[in-house]
Amino acid sequence: MVKGVSWLAALSCLPGGALWAVSPLGVVLAESRLQEGSDLFWKLFPAAPLALALGVVGLLWIGALGSGWPSRAGAGVTLLGLLMVVAGVVGQFWLGLDEAYTVLAPAYYTFRAGLVVLAGGSLVTGLAGMLRGSLPAWGALPFVAAALCGLVAFVWELGTIGSGLWAVFGAGWMWLGFSVAASGLAGSLRRRTRGASHPGKSGAEAG
């Protein structure tokens, strides 16, 4: 039961990454189709970082990110960035903090800082997991590349290019979730195959 819950949490990277990847398109559609503009979309946006935060916790839970301090530090920074992003969006679009404190714009700057912290934490998490062997290289390398794309998009305003890099960042999280799920399924199948091939040995070891 607990193992199933942990895997479900880890797989939250898939919907979280998908929501993040399509968010630039969502902003465009909201501005062109909805009377309230993009505000309504941004009010719903926290679903993406919250799903990613649940995914990070799940990946830690199942040991996919490794047990060393670099992996845990990277995951911790990633979670901090995700929570800052949520706080910034809620503060700006739900609580209207920037309207009350126009000069300081605390929600906006919390959001922007959270994006940079998130990209940096993702980069460290991917590199640490790959170097320690807890993440498959074919899954970690694209994720690291996507984290770099996200860092560029979050630091510099690049217009359409930045929107594309933003989407790539979300796709990187989707790919990470898929690679962890595929590796876990392949490992489970290998263990079952070995158990079926050597039933006598397994019985002797149990005895």
Image (tube, rainbow, N blue to C red):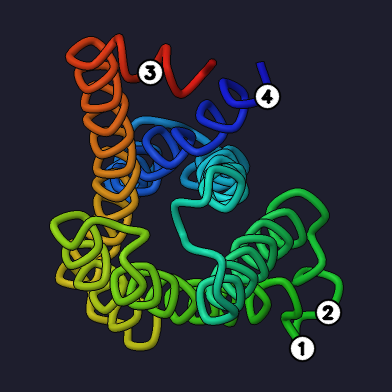
Q: Which mark is residue 101?
A: 2
Q: Quadrant of residue 129?
A: bottom left
- Please provide percent x and percent y for residue 140: 25, 62
Residue sitting nearer the eye, 96 or 156: 156
- Identify the residue position indicated by label 3 in the image: 202
- Please provide percent x and percent y for residue 92: 71, 61
- Do the residues under discs 2 and 3 have CB atoms within 8 angstroms? no
- Do the residues under discs 1 and 2 have CB atoms within 8 angstroms? yes
- Report the Cα–Cα distance between label 1 and label 2: 6 Å
Nearer the observer: mark 1 or 3; the answer is 3
Q: Mark 4: which secondary structure?
A: helix
- Please provide percent x and percent y for residue 27: 37, 47
- Report the Cα–Cα distance between label 4 and label 1: 45 Å
**Amino acid found under the numbered disc labelled 4:** Val
Q: Mark 1: which secondary structure?
A: loop
Nearer the observer: mark 2 or 3; the answer is 3
Q: Earlier in the sequence, mark 4 or mark 1?
A: 4
- Do the residues under discs 3 and 4 have CB atoms within 8 angstroms? no
- Report the Cα–Cα distance between label 2 and label 3: 67 Å
- Report the Cα–Cα distance between label 1 and label 3: 66 Å
Q: Which mark is residue 104?
A: 1
Residue at screen point 56% across, 20% down: 4
Q: Which mark is residue 2?
A: 4
Residue at screen point 24% across, 67% down: 146
Q: Quadrant of residue 81?
A: bottom right
